[in-house]
Amino acid sequence: MSKPRTLFEKVWDAHLVRPETPETPAVLYIDLHLIHEVTSPQAFTELRQRGLRVRRPDKTLGTMDHSTPTTPRNHLGIIPVIDPMAISQLEQLRKNCAEFGIPLFELGDENQGIVHVIGPEQGLTQPGMTIVCGDSHTSTHGAFGALAFGIGTSEVGHVLATQCLLQRKPKTCAVRIDGRLGPGVTAKDIILALIAKYGVGGGTGYVFEYMGEAIRSLSMEERMTICNMSIEGGARAGMVAPDDTTFEYIAGRPFAPKGADFEAAVARWRTLPTDEGAVFDHELTLSASELKPMITYGTNPGMGIPIDAPVPRPEDMPDARSRAALDKALAYMGLEPGKPLLGHPVDVVFIGSCTNSRLSDLRQAAQFFRGRKVAPGVRVMVVPGSQQVKRAAEAEGLDRIFKEAGAEWREAGCSACLGMNDDKVPPGKYAVSTSNRNFEGRQGPGARTMLASPLTAAATAVTGVVTDPRTLMN
Amino acid sequence: MEPISTITGKAVVLPVENIDTDQIIPARFLKVTDKSGLAAGLFEAWRYLPDGTPNPDFPLNRPEAAGATILISGRNFGCGSSREHAPWALQDYGFRAVLAPSFADIFRSNALKIGLLPVTIEQAIYDELVAMYANDPQMALTIDLAAQTVTLPDGRQVGFPIDAFSKYCLLHGVDQLGFLLNQADAIAAYEASHPQPVKTTG
């Protein structure tokens, strides 16, 4: 019998061109490289300067998402880009993909969307693969049992030129989430609670494997939400063992194997889950049954509380450093310690981002908009993760529900998650956002972000104040 | 890339934990297609007041911080996004090394690729450096990469860990892509013996 291995170890071992030694890191083969306009231009410049080609354009895919506008199409059906710097960046990606033979889902294409939404929906993301992108939320793809992580632009160049990365083997961490979620509590609340419990640096150096009853019962889109925010817990990658839920999701998608090839692939994928007796370097635990909807009050994703809890008080912090961090965060957020967030007025609600912009997220949000109006004075942006998500939502009338309630129904992209386009939260204003980061200025200079689930965001949109979604449920 | 052997320079302390890459360089500065001029966006929200004038209370803006080449900051430095613009901006501003009790994984990896040295120090040493800096905002440090030591202002030397391969590349000024390109035969052999799970070109 060979030594029992974890899911991560199986994927890692299968992609070793050269194992690591004390002197040199492993040479790790990459099955899929996703690129976008923001973190790739300098890598292509490097390639040209060195006279290099893209080794495997057939394992590379580009999309436009970060700096693209999400404003409605004009009368010609075109999404107009007016920011000259965004135009230049998008043009550069178009030119780079054309010159090196890389397929591109450009702005206006029926498949365009957020890079971490389109990989899975196209069936490109499959169990056992290695997937990288110049974006930290590449961890999303780990929901399929792939090893997927974000890389910097130098490494984007490495993968373009060699289809490989130099990597030291990370440590493994089992994240056991037992129990079942109660009504109104979602996958987003699981990951926000986990990060609140273990901190934003808790996963540094590790690859998470999420497991347990709660994870097994989640849909693929919910698993993606959890893996997406692994990086907010410090882990570069998060994985979920593939199962029937995974295989059913993949079946029939454009790039998924077909017929007998699919059956053969499923047989291979079934060998991937962690072996009985495999050892992890570390373990974290969380009980799903005890969770409430979560919301953040501070300026990193670890500063989260159950929605009915008071904002922590600096004097209750265990040490001077955490007191200082909390003081700084509350000053930026303009929040009073010891008071609950429930009932706090909100100016903007953003429903979107690679964390929560898929069809199931939009369906969840729509249930609170149906037959209700957005509260006066609140701006609500609903931004589907991809053109496909947008069409699917429109096919079932979700767009009408949002629009009739007074919310904006926009084109696909990263949007107000990071405010690279015009979708921003104004200075000093409060936003409840389904995105992944509440850093100072993340959604625009001076923006005050509270992270929450699509349910909490939608409940807040129609009341105008931070609202526990369970109070609106029948 | 310039080889690094020792870095001696004035230090500036930014005593904040979990400094994320959105603070190091906000997303609106990422709309460039090259690496130049990113220093203008470094810590932009903290460096400038809302009216655009420099914030006199921000450590980097104090007169004694002029010419600092070593940044000392709290744990989990560089958390958040994978943007290499963060180490580019620090380097463009003039920093050659960052000392912190811990670094986020992607930031560390990016910094090592471009020759911005991430130096992990013990929390207790960090606390001491914060105190020393309060007494002497002109304090200087020496980082010896070959010996993997930091010489503190009081003459004590403390060690720091660094991956052997990254150390070699930094000491000799060679970039890691060259090493990977030399693996072409092994990469071709891997490709020949492994099926391709997906083909993006259809």
Image (spheres, helix red, strand yellow):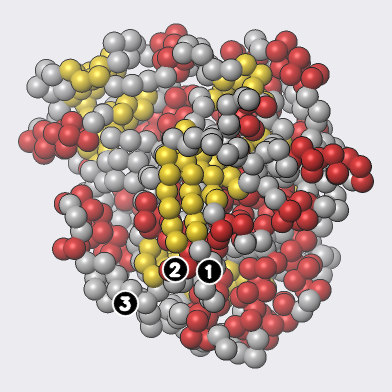
Give the camera-side residue of A125 and A261. Answer: A261
In the rendered image, the quadrant that contains the C terminus of chain A is: bottom right
Q: Where is residue A50 in the image (x, y as percent from the top left)?
A: 66, 17
Residue A130, quarter of the rendered image: top right
Q: Position of residue B175 (x, y in %)?
A: 53, 16
Q: How far is disc 1 from disc 2 in space, using C-alphas?
A: 7 Å
Instruction: Name the residue furthest front.
Output: A1
Residue A448 seen from this side: no
Seen in the picture, residue A384 relative to B130 is either above or below; the reply is below
Disc assigned to residue B182: none
Name which residue type carries label 3. Pro
Badge 1: few (under 14), some or many (20 or more) residues near its Cα, within 10 Å?
many
Name which residue type carries label 2. Leu
Foreground: disc 3 or disc 2: 2
**Residue that numbered label 1 is attached to:** A181
Q: How far is disc 3 from disc 2 in space, using C-alphas?
A: 17 Å
**Residue that numbered label 2 is attached to:** A291
Q: Is mark 3 on a helix, strand or loop?
A: loop
User: What residue sits 16% from the left and 51% below the top?
Assistant: A320
Seen in the picture, residue A96 relative to A221 is either above or below; the reply is above
Residue A170 seen from this side: yes
Residue B128, quarter of the rendered image: top left
Name which residue type carries label 1. Leu
Relative to residue B7, is residue A15 drawn left or right?
right
Q: Which chain hosts label 1?
A: A
Marks 1 and 2 in Cβ contact (< 8 Å): yes
**Residue that numbered label 3 is attached to:** A340
Give the camera-side residue of A245 and A469. Answer: A245
Marks 3 and 2 in Cβ contact (< 8 Å): no
